[in-house]
């Protein structure tokens, strides 16, 4: 049955003219295989030598991988929050053709996020301790439990959508409503992991979890827009242009709103009389420190300004909106990296960095090749799973196949 | 009687009087008298204050001789023995570090590394160096920084698996077997007193060699041998704990339980680091933390450290 409702990605690769058509499933599988091969050495080093080959130190204990983990949470939860809200709460049933794609994308991203954070542990083989010996005074315990529950919920939802033949709509509706508070909690908790740390003034603000939520919705909305542009079954459909236009508007509002909120918070923190020079120092480090390029060029220019201009000026051109959504979605990782790293490279105590000289006792951190390679391996794995899913799973709904196929 | 008189005389010679004597008009005569006394009783210089320590109770039975001025280590050992007689929950271990006496020799750091067999990249008690001012008005001080063993430790509630906790005596412990290595506690510690054991060894790049005392294999014998943190043996094998874990100072709890002072205390050449039971009103540390010149690091956070600094 699955083959009967095959997705457009699984159609023959040559058209009537004999020209080779590049399909998304091939791109994802090909990219996945390449990244797995390229990143294999990073994973081998991680498996055999633990965290030693990384550039992480005792004073900068979290880095590239934690930044990417949070980024992936933003994507997975944000895209599904936006989709579920639009589809179930606002009655945007015309989004149905993209439902399975949104769920499957979220599922793949959840898997990648969990694998990344698993290998960030000093003892990944003990991950189950959090399930068996949880201490719920810790935000990480909440996050692991919520994330595991979210993965289960998403898996069930996806399975019912793909293989339920439309028989479980009521259950799906309940699950979707359940995913809203669960997703919200997951995002808030992932922000609270940083927000509750009193010793890091730049993290320790009540606004941080809320900023995580706004950022997640903006990034997720961009991802959803991209999915519509990539996988909508019939691109000649006027419904398609209308949905792209509305999603572009929503993404623009969330992006602009997020930047505005972050700006207000940032300016408040920068105020000299605020009584927290360390907090101002942290903001300055983001704005003008060694990582400033990632904030100004990657996030603000490529992730906000260019997408905003493209989506506002050409909202009815799906390809342009797709490019804008891609830029916005991909570059959001600069935000999570700027949340995690600059705060940690500011030492707690004066003289700490020079008190005992050792490569693992310093406050300088730039991710090294091994860290990038391991990340490439996990993204390769995700890309391969995604490509295979596009090829073999009945992601395109039967309804759409009948009407538009 | 003669001995007692000499002791009394020694007790009366304080550092302040000694220095006054050296610099004052009495000059040579005072210095000669002072040196004479010190030659007989060098422990006077080891006393904790400008006044020689009072000698009372069990302290009089110290190795310095009945009623004699004693090395503060002797006093602290006696107090430690006394504290160990008490129920566990009635002890409150604190450390006092006199910044005026610390000369920045790093002996405490090294003794801690040796005692706990700490690998490269793991240090429990670095000595921070601070400089301030502009020439000619400059200042410099050394700040040893063990774990503060906070009464409200920020590192404890953040642990997702309860692998770190405060024991009955107030020491923040690690359960290495439970710890998953998420390093959340490290980010939460306001004193950067926790580190990750990345699994390095000192001789990992050493060439292989034949012989009994040369080469990696022989050196490994020592390096792989177990340490005894928390009273358990932790041989350094494979990726086993404490490799991959967060690690921290524990006031040498394994030594304390055997009646020995923490390694950093016994090796401090200036007797700048003191240790004892703050619940014992007669203890040296209880006296010291009642002083007006006492401070604790980052008190504004409300962590209530059990490490006090005299400034």
Image (tube, rainbow, N blue to C red):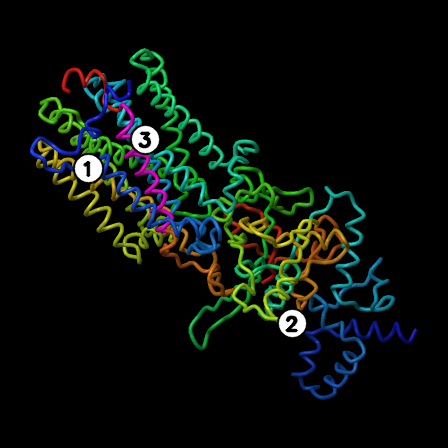
Chain containing the residue with disc 1:
A
**How far apart in space, not on screen, are marks 1 and 2 (Cα)?**
66 Å
Q: Quadrant of residue B23?
A: bottom right
Magenta run includes residue A375: yes
The residue tagged 2 is B211
The residue tagged 1 is A325
Residue occupying image coordinates x 65% and y 47%: B171
Q: Which mark is residue A106?
A: 3
Mark 1 residue element: helix
Across and down, in percent, residue A199 comes to: 46, 48
**How far apart in space, not on screen, are marks 1 and 3 (Cα)?**
16 Å
Magenta run includes residue A162: no
Please state which of residues A153 and A275 is positioned toward the viewer in this rendering.
A153
- The region drawn magenta spans A372-394
Could you tell me if residue A275 is visible in this image? no
Q: Residues within 10 Å of mark 3 (few under 14, many from 20)?
A: many
């Amino acid at each position: 049955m699955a083959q009967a409702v095959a997705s457009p990605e699984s159609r023959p690769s040559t058209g009537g003219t004999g020209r080779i058509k590049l399909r998304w499933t091939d791109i994802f599988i090909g990219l996945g295989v390449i990244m797995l091969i390229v990143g294999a050495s990073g994973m081998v080093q991680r498996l055999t030598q633990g965290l030693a080959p990384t550039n992480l130190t005792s004073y900068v204990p979290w880095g590239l991988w934690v930044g990417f983990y949070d980024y992936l949470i933003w994507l997975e939860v944000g895209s599904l929050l936006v989709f579920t809200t639009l589809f179930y709460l606002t009655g945007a049933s015309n989004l149905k053709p993209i439902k399975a794609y949104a769920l499957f994308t979220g599922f793949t991203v959840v898997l990648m996020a969990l694998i990344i954070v698993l290998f960030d542990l000093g003892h990944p083989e003990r991950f189950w301790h959090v399930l068996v010996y949880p201490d719920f005074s810790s935000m990480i315990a909440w996050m692991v439990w919520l994330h595991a529950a979210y993965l289960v919920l998403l898996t069930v939802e996806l399975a019912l959508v793909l293989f339920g033949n439309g028989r479980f709509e009521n259950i799906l509706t309940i699950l979707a409503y359940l995913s809203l508070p669960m997703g919200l909690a997951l995002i808030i908790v992932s922000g609270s992991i940083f927000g509750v740390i009193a010793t890091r003034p730049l993290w320790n603000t009540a606004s941080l979890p809320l900023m995580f939520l706004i950022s997640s919705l903006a990034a997720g909305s961009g991802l959803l827009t991209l999915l519509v542009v990539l996988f909508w079954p019939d691109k000649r459909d006027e419904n398609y242009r209308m949905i792209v236009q509305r999603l572009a508007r929503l993404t623009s509002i969330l992006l602009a709103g997020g930047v505005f909120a972050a700006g207000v918070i940032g300016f408040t923190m920068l105020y000299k009389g605020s009584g927290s020079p360390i907090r101002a120092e942290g903001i300055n480090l983001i704005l003008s420190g060694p990582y400033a390029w990632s904030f100004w060029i990657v996030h603000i220019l490529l992730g906000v300004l260019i997408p905003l201009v493209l989506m506002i000026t050409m909202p009815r051109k799906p390809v342009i909106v797709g490019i804008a959504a891609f830029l916005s979605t991909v570059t959001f990782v600069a935000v999570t990296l700027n949340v995690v790293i600059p705060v940690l490279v500011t030492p707690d105590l004066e003289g700490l960095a020079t008190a005992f000289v050792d490569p693992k006792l310093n406050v300088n951190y730039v991710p090294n090749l091994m860290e990038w390679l391991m990340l490439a391996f996990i993204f390769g794995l995700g890309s391969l799973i995604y490509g295979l899913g596009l090829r073999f799973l009945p992601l395109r709904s039967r309804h759409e196949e009948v009407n538009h196929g | 009687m003669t001995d007692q008189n000499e002791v009394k005389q020694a007790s009366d010679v304080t550092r302040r009087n000694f220095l006054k004597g050296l610099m004052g008009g009495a000059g040579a005569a005072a210095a000669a008298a002072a040196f004479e006394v010190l030659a007989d009783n060098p422990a006077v210089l080891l006393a904790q204050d400008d006044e020689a320590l009072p000698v009372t109770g069990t302290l009089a039975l110290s190795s310095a001789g009945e009623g004699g001025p004693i090395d503060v280590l002797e006093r602290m050992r006696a107090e430690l023995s006394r504290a160990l007689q008490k129920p566990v929950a009635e002890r409150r271990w604190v450390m006092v570090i006199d910044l005026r006496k610390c000369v920045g020799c790093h002996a405490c750091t090294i003794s801690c590394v040796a005692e706990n067999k700490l690998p490269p990249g793991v240090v429990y008690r670095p000595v921070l160096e601070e400089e301030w001012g502009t020439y000619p008005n400059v200042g410099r001080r050394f700040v040893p920084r063990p774990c503060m063993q906070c009464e409200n430790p920020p590192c404890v509630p953040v642990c997702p698996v309860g692998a770190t906790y405060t024991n009955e005596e107030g020491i923040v412990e690690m359960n290495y077997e439970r710890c998953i290595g998420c390093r959340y506690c490290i980010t939460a510690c306001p004193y950067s007193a926790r580190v990750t054991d990345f699994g390095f060894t000192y001789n990992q790049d050493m060439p292989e060699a034949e012989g009994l005392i040369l080469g990696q294999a022989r050196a490994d014998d020592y390096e792989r041998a177990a340490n005894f943190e928390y009273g358990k043996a932790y041989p350094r094998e494979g990726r086993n704990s404490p490799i991959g874990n967060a690690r921290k100072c524990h006031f040498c709890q394994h030594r304390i339980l055997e009646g020995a002072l923490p390694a950093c205390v016994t090796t401090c050449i200036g007797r700048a680091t003191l240790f004892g039971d703050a619940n014992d009103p007669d203890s040296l540390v209880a006296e010291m933390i009642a002083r007006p010149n006492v401070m604790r690091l980052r008190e504004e956070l409300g962590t209530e450290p059990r490490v006090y600094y005299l400034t």
